[in-house]
Amino acid sequence: MLVKLLQKLQNKHFLSLAGNGIMAILSVVTVAILYRNLTPNDIGSWVVFQTAYVLVDTFRTGFLQTALINFYAGAQEARAKEVVGSTWYLGIVITGISLVVSVPGWLLLPYITNEGLYVTVQWFFATFFCTLPVVMATWVLQAEHRFDRILYVRLVNQGSFIIMVLILIYLNKINIQWVMFVNVLGCFFTLLLVMLNGWAKLPTLVHKTKAGITEIFHFGKYSVGTTISANLLRSSDTFIINALLGPAAVAIYNLPQRLLEIIEIPLRSFLATGMPEIAAAENMGDKVLLRNTLYKYAGILTILIIPVSIGAVILADVGVGLLGGSKYLQTEAANLFRIFMVFAFLFPIDRFVGITLDVVKQPKLNFIKVLLMLVVNVIGDFTAIYFMKSVYGVAVASIPTFVVGVCFGYFSLRKFLPITFSKFFSVGYVETKILLQKTLRKS
């Protein structure tokens, strides 16, 4: 019976879900280990580096990933080689630009006094270079629906990093410089894995064509805007806090951000399953089904988040203690988490309204929505820190950011789809009851 169960679970849907879940767990484990063994300044520097790296990597991913998968999946062999080779070419160009930008930064290292900025300039290019073959392999494997190999690649990357960090702790060598070194070393091990197995398909570089490069470039330039703006929205807080309050404040602020994974993991899962249904309804021209599907997915998540938020507000100190250790219990971390959870019910409506704008062929409005949220957030951060002189100001500034995003997205979508805001809650409540009843009957 166990064998049959495992065989049923060997499908791309389960492997994709398992991959996301396992990586989320490993990410939490990594954060817990680092927070317990690095100083607040070192943690803050690590967060600044991660934020900067993810920001630039988001440009690379947003520019190339969707285009590669879109043109590669199901293509004839010659066409597939052209697509991957052309994508490799653009990836190398982007990586080369990062080298050109890094060289002046290396020359200025003796004059950089901010530790977070110093570490970022020092280690960025090595990390970015080593991860190019890794992300290329991941995108190709995704297009080929090889989620088992994607899981393997991610496990090697994150697992080797965790093991080497534990070795540093055992040797009493744990500090930000050693952590950055083993991070690059873990990326290099993963690079060797994908190259030796041929998953990155580097030899296809000789099959690149000018037409293929142009096609991918023009496709990618439209998808990258929203992706970068969304990442800037998430990372702007970190950069502003680091500049105005220092790396230690970044470490405190990042801790509740990591705890928000209890919301982000199910949200990403619902988005992954809900978007195809919303798109299918649009392609069939069934606006009623589209609207009801939007209500159902966003509504269920909104209703489910409400009791989770209440529990999180009550148990915030427990979460902070488990993830960051006792030294963060006397900081603002727990109260910051409480502030975030008060308006967390807006997250599902904001995300689903955004993807629905894309589905109804209005990606420009979705881009404007995210860009508007970014502007409000940056202005709010500077203003709130100026008056409150603490990280509390940044958390408070997040409230108008999401309110503006939800309002702009909602009223923009109403022009193309007749929706009512209260329906997210009423339909969500009914659909949640139905879902719970079905779950209880099955158990």
Image: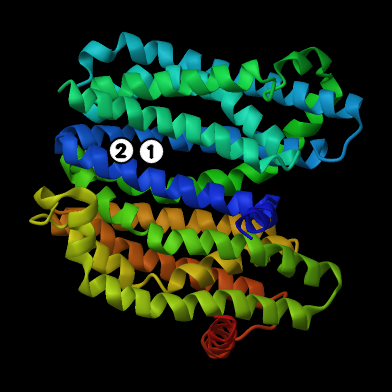
Q: Position of residue 432 (x, y in %)?
A: 54, 84
> Which corner quadrant holds the N terminus?
bottom right
Tell me, yes or no, whether the two marked residues, 1 and 2, touch with CB atoms within 8 Å. yes
Frontmost residue, 340 versus 328: 328
Decide if residue 70 is on the left or right side of residue 39: right
Residue pictured at 92% horizontal, 32% vertical = 76
Q: Which secondary structure, mark 2?
A: helix
Instruction: Determine the residue located farthest toward the top in the rendered image.
Output: 107
Is 355 drawn above or below residue 39 in the view shown? below
Mark carried by residue 47: 2
Q: Which secondary structure, mark 1?
A: helix
> Which corner quadrant holds the C terminus?
bottom right
Residue pictured at 83% horizontal, 24% vertical = 82
Frontmost residue, 332 versus 72: 72
Residue pictured at 43% horizontal, 23% vertical = 186
What residue is disc 1 on?
51
Residue 136, quarter of picture: top right
Q: Position of residue 159 (x, y in %)?
A: 42, 33
Decide if residue 223 is on the left or right side of residue 178: right
How busy is the neighbourhood of tag 2: few (under 14 within 10 Å), some, or many (20 plus)? many
Q: Position of residue 120 (x, y in %)?
A: 33, 25
Can residue 221 be spotted in the picture? no
Looking at the rendered structure, the kind of residue marked 2 is Val
Frontmost residue, 230 versus 139: 139
Q: Position of residue 277 (x, y in %)?
A: 73, 68
